[in-house]
């Protein structure tokens, strides 16, 4: 069954799979994962490890970038970004957050993530940044 994308990406960017968990909805595209955490949850290595393992199993060994689509208010343990840095196929993180607190949080997260990470006001801008900065071949 074909999935309908809830994001405003170009039509050639097909949604492959949606994983609904107890902490977030995770959307899988070819070389992109979009994570939308639920209101009030705390994302950490401890709470997200099983979700991360399931996501990596789904994406396989191909390179990807991650968009944290911050449509809800939730907590993050910024020191846990060091664990994400160790994923060899993860090329970078784009944070899409219209919230004013997003800039301060992103600056703190950058200190722990050793790969490219940028903050954007919209998911469309985050998508464009990822596609321009990481070379992915379309099948």
Image: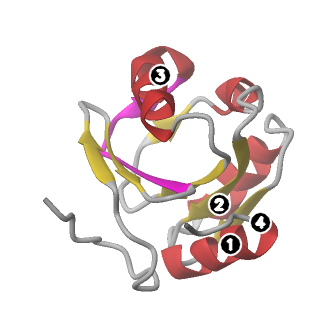
Q: Which residue occupies 48% across, 38% down? A: 75
Residue at image coords 21%, 64% = 3
- Going from N to C along the chain, the mark reached first, 3 or 4, is 3
In magenta, the rendered stretch is 32-44
Q: Quadrant of the N terminus?
A: bottom left
Mark with earlier residue (2, 1)? 2
The first of marks 3 and 1 along the sequence is 3
Tell me, yes or no, whether the highlighted magenta stretch contains residue 35. yes
Who is closer to the viewer here, 75 or 116? 116
Residue picked out by circle 2: 94
Cα separation between marks 3 and 4: 24 Å
- Reading the image, the residue beneath label 3 is 53
Does 60 sit above or below residue 124? above
Q: Which residue lies most toward the top here?
A: 46
User: Is the residue under label 4 in contact with that under label 1 (CB below 8 Å)?
Assistant: no
Q: Residues within 10 Å of mark 1 (few under 14, many from 20)?
A: some
Q: Where in the figure is residue 136, as x and y percent of width and height?
A: 69, 64
The residue lying at 68 percent from left, 31 percent from top is: 84
| CB under 8 Å between discs 3 and 1 | no
> Distance between the Cα atoms at labels 3 and 1?
24 Å
The residue singled out by tag 1 in the image is 131
Q: Nearer the viewer, mark 1 or mark 4?
A: 4
Distance from the alpha carbon under mark 2 to that under mark 1: 11 Å
* Residue to which mark 4 is pinned: 135
- Binning the other alpha carbons within 10 Å of mark 2 as few (below 14), some (14 to 19) or many (20 upward) gives many
Residue 79 appears in which quarter of the rendering? Answer: top right
Local crowd size for mark 4, using a 10 Å CA cut-off: few (<14), some (14–19), many (≥20) = few
Q: Quadrant of residue 61?
A: top right
- Dots 4, 2 in contact, CB < 8 A: no
Of residues 50 and 28, the one nearer the viewer is 28
**Relative height, residue 78 to residue 102 (above, below):** above
């Amino acid at each position: 069954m074909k999935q309908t994308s809830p994001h405003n990406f170009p039509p050639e960017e097909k949604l492959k799979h949606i994983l609904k968990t107890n902490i977030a909805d995770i959307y899988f595209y070819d070389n992109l994962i979009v994570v939308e955490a639920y209101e009030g949850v705390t994302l950490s290595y401890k709470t997200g490890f099983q979700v991360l393992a399931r996501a990596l199993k789904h994406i396989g060994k191909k390179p990807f970038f991650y968009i944290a689509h911050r449509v809800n208010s939730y907590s993050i343990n910024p020191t846990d970004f060091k664990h994400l840095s160790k994923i060899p196929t993860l090329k970078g993180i784009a944070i899409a957050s219209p919230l004013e607190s997003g800039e301060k949080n992103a600056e703190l997260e950058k200190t722990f993530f050793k790969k490219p990470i940028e903050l954007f006001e919209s998911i469309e801008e985050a998508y464009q940044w990822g596609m321009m900065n990481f070379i992915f071949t379309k099948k």
